[in-house]
Image (cartoon, rainbow, N blue to C red):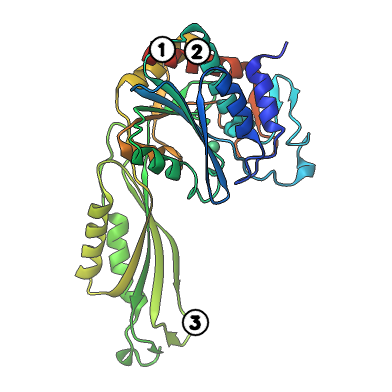
Amino acid sequence: MESDTLKLLKSLIERPSVTPDDAGCQQLLVERLSRVGFECETLEFGEVTNLWARRGSAAPILAFMGHTDVVPTGPLEEWHNDPFKPEIRDGFLYGRGAADMKSGIAAMVTACECFVQQNPDHRGSIALLITSDEEGPAIDGTVRVVETLEARGEKIDWALVGEPSSSKDLGDVIKNGRRGSLGANLTVRGVQGHIAFPQLADNPIHRIIPALNELCDLEWDQGNDFFPPSSFQISNINAGTGVHNIIPGQVEVHFNLRYSTELNQQQIIEIAEAILQKHGLDYSIEWTLSGLPFLTGEGELVEAAQRSIKQVTGIDTKLSTAGGTSDGRFIAPTGAQVLELGTVNASVHKINEHVRVSDLDRLSKIYQGILERLLV
Ligand SMILES: [Zn+2]
């Protein structure tokens, strides 16, 4: 007998929703959620389809967050089954989006259905914020929905992101924050000239090396209980014409900082530019912020998740802020508590992506347990 969560997951995988095409996934969610009293609103921005579904009108709001889009399959001949025709082998379900993150979405929906059946008069509101643009540019997805909600005063208190956070076993790791990511394109100018007449030139490579050394050696911070120390990394250095007898006129350097909550972007920019100025460089720099750091410390949401995981799996879960950015970055600045909790992430974006079938109902039970702890 296939469980409800497994059946729904299979139906979602059968819809080939490669970013930004939702391929009817959200319509399926609308049908399920409307039946149990959710008001469903489709918000389209550009090519992106987003869904905001809410049951109840009171505060607080517990919102499940996720995305229906998936990354491309890669070479089909390397898959052991059609990635959009889910198949179970040895206790695992294979298909594109099985782990990232249609299993999370299926589990959210069945958790809400069971919870509502047992608690039709729950307090506050349950919501789902689903986008079809998480894997792509993420411009017309979650960020636009959050703006829309803020403009009309709908405030999410707890955001539970269904991304695959687990490492080996379901529930062993949950993500309660992310590092910030700040990049820079730096150009340092000198004067081009003949290698044989350095007195007539000004070598920008020689000028920039001591400054880069200082930036690399700097201890930006020591991190804290939740974050490793902030890290400065150079990704590109370009200068020179390819010949041996020319001092180049300029050098370009790209670098990035993955930073903890001990620093903010303004502090980083001031420290870096002070170093560049101290070395007397003639430079220009462009900074790009791709995500603010955020951290949800101990609180109701973390506690509800820890207890629910313990009850369903017996595991004492570990809090982590490792990994790349997620859509949690768009909701954290509104003051919401944000947590990522989902299936095992070992196969995400890979060929033969899969999820353990027995984890599906357990994930649904964990989500349901969180609803019971926060909204009863
Ligand atoms: Zn994802």
Frontmost residue, 152 versus 122: 152
**Whole-percent x, y for residue 222 in the image:** 26, 41
Within 8 Å: ligand 1 and the Cβ of disc 1? no
Element at label 3? loop
Check if mark 3's residue and mark 1's residue have beta carbons within 8 Å.
Answer: no
Element at label 1? loop
Q: How far separated are the C-alphas under marks 2 and 1?
A: 8 Å
Q: Which mark is residue 116?
A: 2
Precedes in sequence: disc 2 or disc 1: 2
Residue at label 1? Answer: 122
Total numbered circles:
3
Q: Is residue 260 left or right of residue 310?
A: left
Q: Residues within 10 Å of mark 1 (few under 14, many from 20)?
A: some
- Closer to the observer: label 3 or label 1? 1
Q: Quadrant of the N terminus?
A: top right
Residue at label 3? Answer: 241
Q: Is residue 345 left or right of residue 199?
A: right
Above or below for 3 versus 285: above
Q: How far separated are the C-alphas under marks 3 and 1?
A: 69 Å
Give, as a three-letter code, the residue at label 3: Thr
- Closer to the observer: label 3 or label 2? 2
Q: How far separated are the C-alphas under marks 3 and 2?
A: 67 Å
**Whole-percent x, y for residue 149 in the image:** 39, 37
Q: Please name the residue shown 34% across and 45% down the image.
A: 292
The quarter of the image that holds ligand 1 is top right
Give, as a three-letter code, the residue at label 1: His
Q: Please name the residue shown 32% across and 57% down the image.
A: 216
Q: Residues within 10 Å of mark 2 (few under 14, many from 20)?
A: some
Give, as a three-letter code, the residue at label 2: Val
Element at label 2? helix
Q: Is residue 329 visible?
A: no
**Whole-percent x, y for residue 90 in the image:** 73, 20
